[in-house]
Image: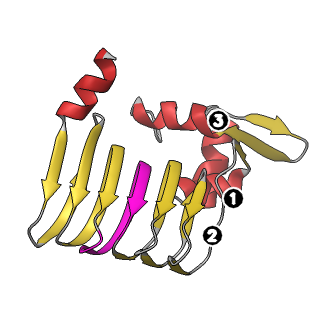
Amino acid sequence: MALRRRLEEKIMDLDANMQGSLSFKDPVNVRINGKFEGNLEIKGTLTIGHTASVFADIVGDSIIIGGRVKGKVTAKEALVLLPTAIMEGDIYPARLNVAEGAILQGRCSMLHDFMNAEELARYLEVDLGSILEWANSGKVPGAKEGEGWRFERRTIDSWVSAGKVGK
């Protein structure tokens, strides 16, 4: 209960027009009701209100879309498209809930608990050569399987959170 209360205290409402990059390292609940252009990286829950227009690449834990979003969306825990949602772009959710009436124009690739090197490169937005170099040198946590590699998403998320990417 105390953890939930602390998370609920960190709520940011964005009702204005904004442009740029927003990144949150600590869990926070963010609601966008206006217009946003740029990049969003959210730990916690991001809610795009039904009056919002967002033109951004978004990476977050839980993402709820009620308005218009154009861009790439990666939801590490869950993505919800409400009946008023208009989503244009590719989505990468761990779990997906699309309500009747929501519009999705783009591709959907579900995040799995385990990824191969190509999926990890796409997930981390780095080139495949870097992933293979990191894996072969032991810089990224993974397991060799035959000729390929296998990476657990939760372990990768912890590795990224610890700031160990490329080190």
Marks 2 and 1, Cα distance to the nearest angstrom?
16 Å
Residue 67 point in image, percent of width and height = 33, 73
Sequence-wise, the earlier of marks 2 and 3 is: 2
* Residue 103 percent across, percent down from the top left: 51, 81
Q: Is residue 135 left or right of residue 61?
A: right
Q: Nearer the viewer, mark 2 or mark 1?
A: 2
According to the picture, the residue beneath numbered tag 3 turns out to be 137
Classified by dominant secondary structure, the portion drawn in magenta counts as strand
What's the distance in space between the residues labelled 2 and 3, CA to CA? 32 Å
The amino acid pointed to by label 3 is: Ser
Q: Which stretch is magenta?
A: 50-66
* Residue located at (50% from left, 57% from top): 79
Question: In this rendering, does residue 164 appear at all?
Answer: yes
Q: Which mark is residue 24?
A: none
Between residues 159 and 40, which one lies in front from this camera angle?
40
Q: Mark 1 — residue?
A: 118
